[in-house]
Image (cartoon, coloured by chain):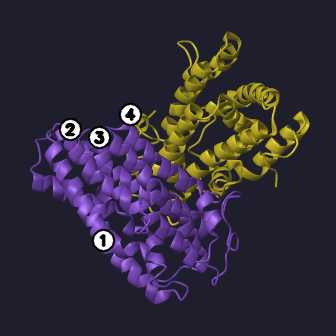
Chain colours: A purple, B yellow
Amino acid sequence: MTGRTDPLLSHAELEAALREIGATRYHSLHPFQTLLQEGRLTRAQVQAWALNRYYYQSNIPVKDAIILARLGTVELRREWRQRILDHDGSETERGGIEKWIALTDGVGLDRDYVMSGKGILAGTRFAVDAYVHFVRDRTLLEAIASSLTELFSPNVIGVRTRGMLAHYDFISAETLAYFDKRPVQAKRDSDFALNYCLEHADTREKQEAVMDALRFKCQVLWAQLDALYFSYVEPALTPPDAWRPGEADAGREAR
Amino acid sequence: MTGRTDPLLSHAELEAALREIGATRYHSLHPFQTLLQEGRLTRAQVQAWALNRYYYQSNIPVKDAIILARLGTVELRREWRQRILDHDGSETERGGIEKWIALTDGVGLDRDYVMSGKGILAGTRFAVDAYVHFVRDRTLLEAIASSLTELFSPNVIGVRTRGMLAHYDFISAETLAYFDKRPVQAKRDSDFALNYCLEHADTREKQEAVMDALRFKCQVLWAQLDALYFSYVEPALTPPDAWRPGEADAGREAR
């Protein structure tokens, strides 16, 4: 167990500690993720995942805009704004949110329903909102550190995409286009954020705060899958205001 | 389905609609609650419930202080401040938080650990924090309406207390003293809040906002039990940073 009064860690030690947090807490370890990539979910359960995760995706540029407003220098903002471009896209290039809508289209959910945010689980909303509040209320260093889960996503995305394509006949490569560019973007973004944290966490207390911020973010991702598992897998007790299988179903042919 | 453009409801109709929300969404319907009051939980699972709910209890005066600051009149503040007195107590009378500590003492949890907030589930923290943010960020009417779950608690408390006393040999009447006064307090508080909402929701849009606020609060309570169920009942997958059975255990004799 490490503590705030221990000696300063070297950059290599801090990076190793952060990677250890990912190795033990990243949501790739969650049973819902395992079921998803091994083809053991029904189409309705995959729809529930896509619907709920849209709320997370659609709040990413919100949290990045809050960070952008706090960065304080032209140079840092130039780096960070790319994340917003990636998610919001442009007239000539689809952004991540639009690609996620293509995913929810692809699994047969009504687009207006998805974008309305209706039917998402309370656990999804509380976790995502906690992330937005975190980057607003904590130190800038902690806000940046909370993005470090992207250190762990490139590898997971490949496993998930291959698994979903192999196992679900209702999933196409086009449906999963969101994930095509994410590994390269995530590596670029997390390299920057990691270097920022290594440079700016110049006391042991700040280093511990960086680790705690990453643990928090792992919880944000994990709690979303807890909610999906409880409501749609086991005991599969879907609360009254949440989406139900068959609801807002645009049909498999409807795009 | 009702909507914001429908005609204004009478007071009786709005009250009936609010009671219907409780009848379908209050956490007394959650499987964890059923297991708890039917004596089907282990001591460790009851400890997990007591530990996590402490975080909720300890934030009640926080959310009430935020509302207090927003009420705007001497008369309203005089009514509302009683809630804070009830939870924080005085030199001569134990408050609700102190009684909850007696409950966690009674089930054998270390007091300092409980009060530190360490080991609570992410789902607990996200749900409770969402409640605190809600009463800060929404309209005063919505903030007050979110307390209306107390309309439904008096009856549930009796069932739960009798069930727990009958089924668990590690639970005594003293351990559950928290619940002794809650039915009377909750009735007084919810009568006031209900009348406030009936009076001040003078458009259909505000009436719908009151109903939505109560649905939200039901989700806050429900999501906490989802998190407990997932992490300690089924699949009982306890995340790395959460409390584990045996941890911080003061022993059954230690009071």
Q: State if disc 4 and disc 1 touch (CB < 8 Å).
A: no
> Residues under labels 3 and 4: Cα distance?
30 Å
Which numbered disc flags the more N-terminal residue, 2 or 1? 1
Mark 2 lies on a secondary structure that is: helix
Mark 4 lies on a secondary structure that is: helix
Which numbered disc flags the more N-terminal residue, 1 or 3? 3
Q: Quadrant of the C terminus of chain A?
A: bottom right
> Residues under labels 1 and 4: Cα distance?
43 Å
Q: Which mark is residue A140?
A: 3
Q: Is residue B162 left or right of residue A116?
A: right
Please tell me which residue lies in front, A147 or A251: A251
Mark 3 lies on a secondary structure that is: helix
Circle 3 chain: A
Splitting the image into 4 quarters, where does residue B204 fall?
A: top right
From the image, tell me which residue sits under label 4. B112
Work out whether disc 3 and disc 4 sit on a shared chain: no
From the image, tell me which residue sits under label 1. A183
Tell me which amino acid carries mark 1.
Pro
Between label 1 and label 4, give the one nearer the viewer. 1
Residue sitting at x 52%, y 32% = B59
Residue sitting at x 40%, y 51% = B242
From the image, tell me which residue sits under label 2. A205
Neighbor class of circle 4 (other Cα within 10 Å; few <14, some 14-19, many 20+) is few
Tell me which amino acid carries mark 4.
Asp
Work out whether disc 4 and disc 2 sit on a shared chain: no
> Residues under labels 2 and 1: Cα distance?
31 Å
Q: Is residue B246 above or below residue A95?
A: above
